[in-house]
Amino acid sequence: MSSSDGIGRLRAIERQFDRDRIAVADLKSLEDIRTRYLSRKAGLLTLELQNLGTLPKDQRADFGRVANEVKLKIEASLDTLQATIAEREKQTALGREALDVTLPGNRRRVGHRHPLTIIRNEIEDIFVSMGYTVEDGPEVENTYYNFDALNFPAGHPARDPRDTFYVSDHMILRTHTSPVQVRTMEKIQPPCASSAPAACFDAMHSIQHTRRCSTKSNVSLLMKASPSRT
């Protein structure tokens, strides 16, 4: 694939989005179109960005510039649509209800994303832009994927219940994201490029953390990006 082919497909996605956004009438249809184009695993633009790594190095800059331009345009259009729909629904609600606008209202606190979520999304965007896929797997994992498939012998210290949370004899809370790589290679023929930012659980770390921070939680959340080219 050449950069001109990729840029042509990006412009086609841009034109298709311009047509689709006309039909957006409410928040549900807005979320549907956002998922269709920007979903981290199957969005039309996301899938096209994964082709960046297949381009010759001297053609990546042009492709990346156009891709960033299209992405920013789509995100800005969706934000504008969201504001417009929210204002329209607000005016409709006000029209249905008799309100005394002179009464003081209760100010609603605006929520925000957790810092770990923000960082994880940024990590995923970086890897996707380099041609990686974002993979995920179960947090309650089989010992085969967590240990056996990774050459951890039966007597390895990592299998000790003092280090690992056991749900049953063969089921645990995963201690790393390497099991995701094993599962990925089972469903995708290598070579493949994947990243797996996810939650891991470490019994020993959790006990120390509980003593040090006096927290009620006995499970610690570890963010771990595990890029693998296998």
Image: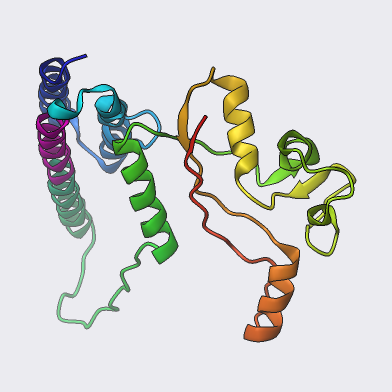
Magenta span covers which residues?
60-76
Residue 198 horizontal side relative to residue 123, left or right = right
Residue 135 position in % (x across, y down) = 50, 36
Q: Is residue 65 left or right of residue 182?
A: left
Specify the principal SS of the magenta part. helix
Q: Is residue 136 left or right of residue 215?
A: left
Q: Nearer the viewer, residue 173 or 154?
A: 154
Which residue is found at the position 52% from the left and 54% from the top? 224
Question: Looking at the image, what colour scheme do you see?
Answer: rainbow
The residue at the point 85 percent across, 42 percent down is: 170
* Foreground pick, 47 / 36: 47
- The residue that appears at 78% across and 49% down in the rendered structure is 172
Residue 160, position in %: x, y? 85, 57
Quarter holding the N terminus?
Answer: top left
Residue 37 in sight here: yes
User: What residue sits 72% from the left and 42% below the top?
Assistant: 146
Q: Can you give x and y, in whole percent of width and height, for residue 30 in the image?
A: 25, 38
Q: Is 7 part of what is drawn in magenta?
A: no
When the figure is inspected, residue 194 is found, relative to residue 206, above or below; the finding is above
Residue 62: in magenta span? yes
Is residue 48 in sight in this rendering?
no
Residue 154: x, y in percent?
88, 44
Question: Which quadrant of the figure has residue 221?
Answer: bottom right
Drawn side of residue 106 relative to residue 101, left or right: right
Of the pair 140 and 16, the residue shown nearer to us: 140
